[in-house]
Amino acid sequence: MTNQADIHTLMMGLGERARLAARGLAIAPTDQKDQALRESAALMRVRKQDIMAANQKDVATAKENNISAAFIDRLTLDEGRIDAIADGLEQIALLDDPVGTKLAEIRRPNGLVIDRVRTPLGVIGVIFESRPNVTADAGALCLKSGNAAILRGGSDSVHSSRAIHQCLADGLEAAGLSKDAIQLVPTTDREAVGKMLQGLHGNVDVIVPRGGKGLVGRVQQEARVPVFAHLEGICHIVVDKSADLTMAKDVILNAKMRRTGICGAVETVLIDQHVSSLLVPELVDALVEMGCEVRGCDRTTSLDDRVKPATEDDWSTEYLDAIVSVRVVDDFDQALDHIGQYSSHHTEAVIAEDDAVVQRFFTEVDSAILMHNASTQFADGGEFGMGAEIGIATGKMHARGPVGVEQLTSFNYRVHGKGHTRP
């Protein structure tokens, strides 16, 4: 694309073709959609070396540009990750088809029968950055839920996304469905994002951003269509005085270090003062040994001199790296106050054996995902049995938490009468 007129023409064409494809997908049989997913998965396995070769180009460019290790980790594909993506497509094929599901039946005194039935949203625009797996996850989830998808990856993952998208397009064709059901924007020009956010003349129904704070912030500010998104994943773990401390240490280590660059990684740990002297030294030992930098409040630094003093900014920072902040709190109330002030409403966890504390946590903390005695890294649609997710939504309208196939549907009311007229 050489100018804005070209990009406008390109994007309007994508939108029109997506809308037409969405009409066909809305009535496509479940078996046909599932066949497309299985064909795509098979092609990904057959073309594994081609996908990795394309990915190596993206990784090499990222390294030349001195991109962070966390970013490169999200970008990198190996045989295991490609197999996992293909497995994810097959798992989505095994999910129940939400389209046409009856959610409720209302029988009125006058004899009218009203059904509430799941329907596709229509056309979903997905804008993402360094995670090439989003190409497959988003395309597959949209397909299963009867929606057409317009995918716009970042320049950092352009080669990887194209290789994966080709598998999806060929899988659709093999199943007798339109390739336009999952389209990849062929330009990395930022103007294309602006066109999507404007809705492509009414042809985009929902936007889902997957990426850093800058991208998500822009989408939320400029979008003229509904958005499913989270701005940050500032996740907390509260260690109550009733906690099993061995469990607490194990959960925290997993929540921070399993994968540091994902939105479900814990960023702040809040430890009750009654157990801090026992837990903090052992926890810091383990974290430092694993290569994690620990920043803490005054009470935390007094318990271990390897802890660096935390600043006010640390409590509101999504590190996406091997860094964690630790605060010793007076009690559970202070922990809740801290979460209320700094949380991004993504995922929080409590480690506790006191049922009353757990109940308060579930009732009083206002985040999309709440966990008890479990790692925050379970904040994932696949772990929730959704097969995969298109993202984590932290808003309160329509979808919240992992956005899977059910969350990518709306519903309509179907009213059955027998010649009824209203008096």
Image (cartoon, grey):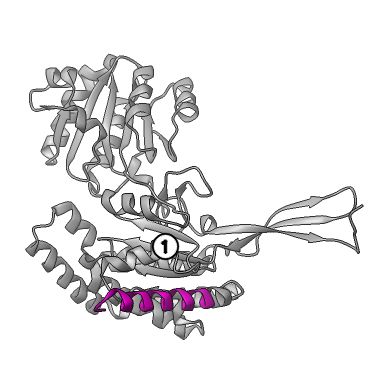
Dot 1 amino acid type = Gln
In-image side of 241 versus 311 (left or right): right
Which corner quadrant holds the N terminus?
A: bottom left
Magenta stretch: give its range: 1-21
Q: Compared with residue 138, is residue 113 higher up or lower down, i.e. above or below?
A: above
Determine the residue positioned at 38% across, 27% down: 340
Is residue 187 part of the magenta span, yes or no?
Answer: no
Q: Nearer the viewer, residue 331 or 367?
A: 367
Coordinates of residue 92 in the picture (x, y in percent): 47, 65
Q: Secondary structure at mark 1?
A: loop
Residue 418 falls in image quadrant: bottom right
Is residue 18 part of the magenta span, yes or no?
Answer: yes
Neighbour tally class for label 1: few under 14, some 14-19, many 20 plus, Cα within 10 Å: some
Query: Could one spot residue 304 in this view of the protein?
Result: yes
Identify the residue position indicated by label 1 in the image: 198
Coordinates of residue 45 in the picture (x, y in percent): 32, 76
Query: Could one spot residue 41 in this view of the protein?
Result: no
In-image side of 403 versus 256 (left or right): right
Q: Nearer the viewer, residue 262 or 377?
A: 262
Residue 199 falls in image quadrant: bottom left
Coordinates of residue 234 in the picture (x, y in percent): 30, 38
Q: Compared with residue 35, is residue 75 higher up or lower down, i.e. above or below?
A: above
Q: Compared with residue 61, is residue 47 higher up or lower down, i.e. above or below?
A: below
All told, the count of numbered labels is 1
Determine the residue positioned at 34% across, 63% down: 194
Q: Main secondary structure of the magenta part?
A: helix
In-image side of 337 versus 2 (left or right): right
Determine the residue positioned at 25% across, 20% down: 328
Coordinates of residue 209 in the picture (x, y in percent): 36, 56
